[in-house]
Image (cartoon, rainbow, N blue to C red):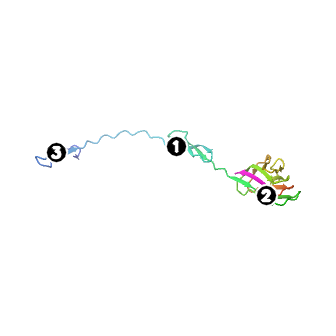
Amino acid sequence: MTTGAAGSSVTVTNAGTSSAAVFNITIPKGDKGDTGSTGAPGNAATISVGTVTQLSAGSTPAVTNAGTSSAAVLNFGIPGSPTRFWSCQPGLGDGLNTIATGTYLQWTCRNDTGSTITLTGISCIADAGSSTVSMTNGAGTALLTSAISCGTSYTAGTQSATTTLASNDYVKLTVAASGSKQVSIDVKGTL
């Protein structure tokens, strides 16, 4: 079957034989129709950012549309960074010989992380005696409400109102030895 010119007649021809006919049919195409009316112009869609919320570390990022399909307002939920930890663990003594009473030793642990550290715990342990530990930051501000008396199991100190350590600041630890052979200190924080 073929399409003929508009306005032509329908034709049928036999391309086969009288006993095995194969008809070729030509059908004219229709006249061209009238042009339809033009529709009203549409509005361009818009997209804007709504809220950006920090989600807990390890969660799945999320995007929701608080607007409509033609005026989208996208709200984003972005996972936070995992918590990073910082620690300072100086020690004193060899564990064999008693440290002379009245020996004062100092260590510093610098915050070289590039971020502010929130101090989360300060403790010490001594094998014997009554050694104490005090702690300040680089400006001399006390980081403990009072010195820690180190026991034979880790003894936690009470932090002062200053609980952060700025980048490049440092913790200064002072140990007053008294009858101990070994004193260990543990300062912990998060970034």
13 relative to 165 in the view: left or right: left
- Going by the numbered disc 1, the residue's amino acid type is Thr
Q: Look at discs 3 and 2 and give the one toward the viewer.
A: 2
Characterize the magenta stretch by its predominant secondary structure. Answer: strand
Give the residue pinned by disc 2.
Answer: 91
Q: 2 and 43: which one is in front?
A: 2
Q: What percent of the width, then of the height, locates residue 78?
A: 60, 46
3 and 2 marks in contact (CB < 8 Å)? no
Q: Which residues are magenta?
A: 182-191
Which structural element holds mark 3?
strand
Give the residue pinned by disc 1.
Answer: 46
Q: 75 and 30: which one is in front?
A: 75
Q: What percent of the width, then of the height, locates residue 191?
A: 69, 51
Give the residue pinned by disc 3.
Answer: 12
Membership of 185 in magenta stretch: yes
Residue 86 seen in the figure: yes
